[in-house]
Image: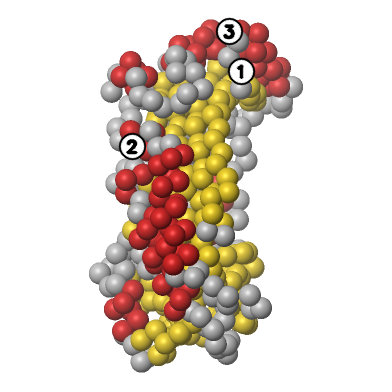
Amino acid sequence: MTPAKARRRPRVPLDPLLDLDALAERIIKLSEADETEVEIHIGSDALTRFANNTIHQNVAEQTLGISVRAVVDGRTARSSTNKTDDESLRRVVASAAQLAHNQPKNPDLLPMLTRQKYQKVARFSGATSAANPQMRARAVTKVCRMADKARQTAAGIFSSGSIHEVMANSKGLFARYEQTRAEFSVTILEENSSGWAKSTSYDIREIDPESLAESASQKAASSRNPRELEPGHYTTILEPAAVLDLVGFLFYDFAATAVLDKRSCLTGRLGKKLFGENITLWDDVYHPLQLGQPFDGEGVPRQKVLLIDRGVPKNLVYSRATAKKMKTKPTGHGFALPNEHGEAPMNLVWSGGDKTVGEMVASTERGVLVTRLWYIREVDPYNKILTGMTRDGTFLVENGRVTGGIRNFRFNQSVIDMLSNVEMLGPAVRSSGEESFDMVVPAMKVRNFHFSEVTKF
């Protein structure tokens, strides 16, 4: 796609004539630093919020961010602005250079990259970009009427937006990315029960608010008058959103910086069997269900990396500086400099299976079915023990059937142990939760999941 064609799209009303390529070049020419890097981000976001079966808020914003990184005599720093007039651009360039001059020399700082080649990804939807308050309101109104008819209460959000980003530097690097994103989340409430569902996509046409609301409504109805179940170790069926919010706590453990600093649960465990044979994990920004740029914070092309192979942690992801320290090659997962975190895999794709949640239930003599989790905190970083609570649809399974709702549990569970006890996997799907970023993940049937106490909620 040519820059001219990209500019013809109805992307951001902030300034439809703003040429980001020319703006980046203009900023670099203003700089007298040894090296200069520019990142420009334009975003457009709109959200329709509803509660008590009524739309009560519609908000929209357009944002512009310009970030300039300067390198002066082996020192680097960054400064930002949201203005494009000449004086503001001169100030931000001068500020970055002055801040860099006042920093200590960084012995790990590498020269900026020259021009790179990037694999193309298509994640911009005209339908999402053109979505308006009326379109979102029509969908939400149907959901609210459905809840009214069922004598339930609906609350949630329906949002849509787009981003356009450019990265350039004085060594000739230039990277461009554009993406749309839509999200629908709904909670259905009854007197003593609730249900929840959520979906995200770059294409708003792939989101079905009515179907999501029907699922949440059914969960709320099925969990009425929840019983109290004794805490203990149960066979547990975790729907994809619940799996996501647990395994998401592993993402930074695959950062080479975390292993180098001995802050990763994989320290001393790489190449050893740690999880079940049925657990395989990739970081893959090019997967059709993923979103995100095909380049990292320094402009390095992202690579697909096998992180876990049939239960064995195989590889890490590397920024340029960490790769040099560990005598390997960067994988395109570094954060924008300067930073203290190094890198991380942000496009996790877990292997799946062919079992539906219904089949998992049918195979379970006695267990617990979990819709989602919340308020998750890490208790033991090396053994990856987490604590948190179930929410919005927790059910008792008996003799292969869901027999009713149960009071929510607090859990204390090692993710390492959990991934060693997976008995069944569902198909891997794009999923959203509340405690971690979106990823491609399956539902899981897990033995001996530890619920430590019944909550008051």
Instruction: Say what secondary structure mark 3 lies in.
Output: helix
Residue 342 drawn above or below residue 282: above
Of the two numbered discs 3 and 2 in the rendering, the one whose residue sits closer to the viewer: 2
Distance CA(mark 3)–CA(mark 1): 15 Å
Label 1: state its secondary structure: loop
Residue type at tag 2: Ala
Q: Mark 2: few, some, or many residues within 10 Å (few <14, many ≥20)?
A: some
Say what amino acid the circle numbered 1 marks. Answer: Lys
Point 38% across, 47% down: residue: 201
Pointer 2 residue: 127
Residue 16 shows in this picture: yes
Which residue in the protein does label 3 denote? 30
Return the residue nearer the eye: 117 or 454. 454
Residue 278 versus residue 247: which sits nearer the camera? 247
82 vs 235: above or below = above
Image quadrant in which the C terminus is located: bottom right
Q: Is residue 10 left or right of residue 427?
A: right
What amino acid type is highlighted by mark number 3? Answer: Leu
The numbered disc on residue 83 is 1
- Which quadrant of the structure image shows residue 455? bottom right
| Disc 2 element | helix
